[in-house]
Image: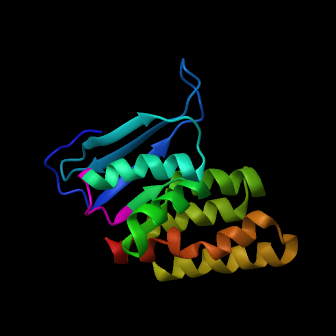
Amino acid sequence: LLSLNVPAEFVLVDDTSCVNTFHFPVITVLCPTPSGANHVLAWGLIRNRTTQTLQRFFSFVVRFFPNIRIFMCDRHFAQRRAISHVFGDAAHIFHCCVHVARNIKENTGQNSTLASQFWAMRFQRTKAAEDTFVATLMRYNDAKRTVFTTQLLNALDSFLPSKVDAAL
């Protein structure tokens, strides 16, 4: 854990899937700066990616950085549960758009309309683009009714640009 004199209210959280020499996941907490750099606030080799292990990691993070309120992370549910447990109701957890887009492509096809509308929504950042994406997602869910699309519909507040912008 690194203790830097930075106002860490917004952080990025990322972990790996055991791709290092020790075969343990590596987790990092980064704080973006106005200059575009990212400061590493905390990192660790963790035993696994379970909620319990991640809660232990974040319990160390909160000791040094109790003011973190906005988290940008993958769609890893153990991460979300651990952050919510340690940082409480004040924590706003958003999903990384790269991970959401990757999940959309994996679940709907590389050249899906849903994937292209997702990126259009992210870059245009308009209500019309959001509405188009959500309508397409709802139609896709009505037709296919997959666990993935249901989860995505339930998690709209965690990645729609208007929700992320409002929290920042």
Quadrant of the image for the C terminus?
bottom left
At 24% from the left and 51% from the top, the residue drawn is 64
Spot the residue most to the left: 5
Is 36 drawn above or below residue 62 in the view shown? Answer: above
At 54% from the left and 77% from the top, the residue drawn is 130
Quadrant of the image for the N terminus?
top left
Magenta-drawn stretch contains 96: no
Q: Position of residue 42 (x, y in %)?
A: 33, 41
Residue 103 appears in the figure = yes
Q: Position of residue 70 (x, y in %)?
A: 36, 65
Please state which of residues 16 and 153 is positioned toward the viewer in this rendering.
16
Please state which of residues 127 and 98 is positioned toward the viewer in this rendering.
98
Spot the residue most to the top: 21
Please state which of residues 7 and 90 is positioned toward the viewer in this rendering.
90
Residue 76 appears in the figure = no
At 72% from the left and 53% from the top, the residue drawn is 111
Coloring scheme used: rainbow
Q: Position of residue 25 (x, y in %)?
A: 54, 34
Q: Which residues are magenta?
A: 64-70
Dominant secondary structure, magenta: loop
Asked which quadrant contains residue 144, the reply is: bottom right
Magenta-drawn stretch contains 69: yes
At 69% from the left and 69% from the top, the residue drawn is 151
**Lateral position of residue 31 relative to residue 5, left or right:** right
